[in-house]
Structures are given as C-alpha cells and as structure tokens.
Amino acid sequence: MGATHFLTGALPKVKTDMSLNALAYNLKRMMALFGVRPLIRAMAT
C-alpha cells in the first residue's frame, strides 16, 4: 500500500491510521475497476 510508517504513536491511533489507509486503498481500487461516476451514484442512494 505504500505506507512505511504510521503518523501516530499510541496503539488505538495506529489502528485508526491503518483503517484509513485500508479505506483509501479500497476506494482507489474501486475507482479503477468501476469508475468514479458509478461509485458516486451508489454512495448517493
């Protein structure tokens, strides 16, 4: 995913940081597979 370090130090914050990294990775993959417009339509409903 390209993340080599975490911006935060405490374990709960690192969990949040990793969750945001995973969310961004998954959104990038979905945009590449389906395109942006279908995803925006799906999120709007």
Image (cartoon, rainbow, N blue to C red):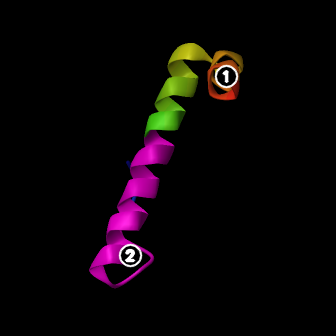
* Pair 1/2: label in front: 1
Q: Residue 14 got which mark?
A: none
Residue 20 on the magenta span: yes
Res 16 quadrant in image? bottom left
Residue 23 counted in the magenta span: yes
- Where is residue 13 drawn, in percent x and y? 38, 75
When the figure is inspected, residue 32 is found, relative to residue 19, above or below; the finding is above
* Three-letter amino acid code at the position of disc 1: Thr
Looking at the image, which residue is at 39% across and 59% down?
A: 3
Tell me the element at label 2: helix
Name the residue furthest front.
45
The part of the chain drawn in magenta is 4-25
- Which residue is situated farthest in the bottom direction here? 9
Q: Inspect this view and state whether residue 8 appears.
A: yes
For residue 13, the mark is 2
Residue 2 at least partly seen: no
Q: Quadrant of residue 12?
A: bottom left
Q: CA distance from mark 1 to mark 2?
A: 31 Å
Q: Please tell me whether mark 1 sits on a helix, a strand or a loop.
A: loop
**Observer-nearest residue: 26 or 5?**
26
Which of the two residues, 5 or 30, is positioned nearer the viewer here? 30
Q: Residue at x 53, y 35 (%)?
A: 28
The residue that label 1 is drawn on is 45
Identify the image quadrant of residue 4.
bottom left
Above or below, 22 relative to 8: above
Which amino acid type is marked by label 2? Lys
Identify the mark nearer the N-term, 1 or 2.
Answer: 2
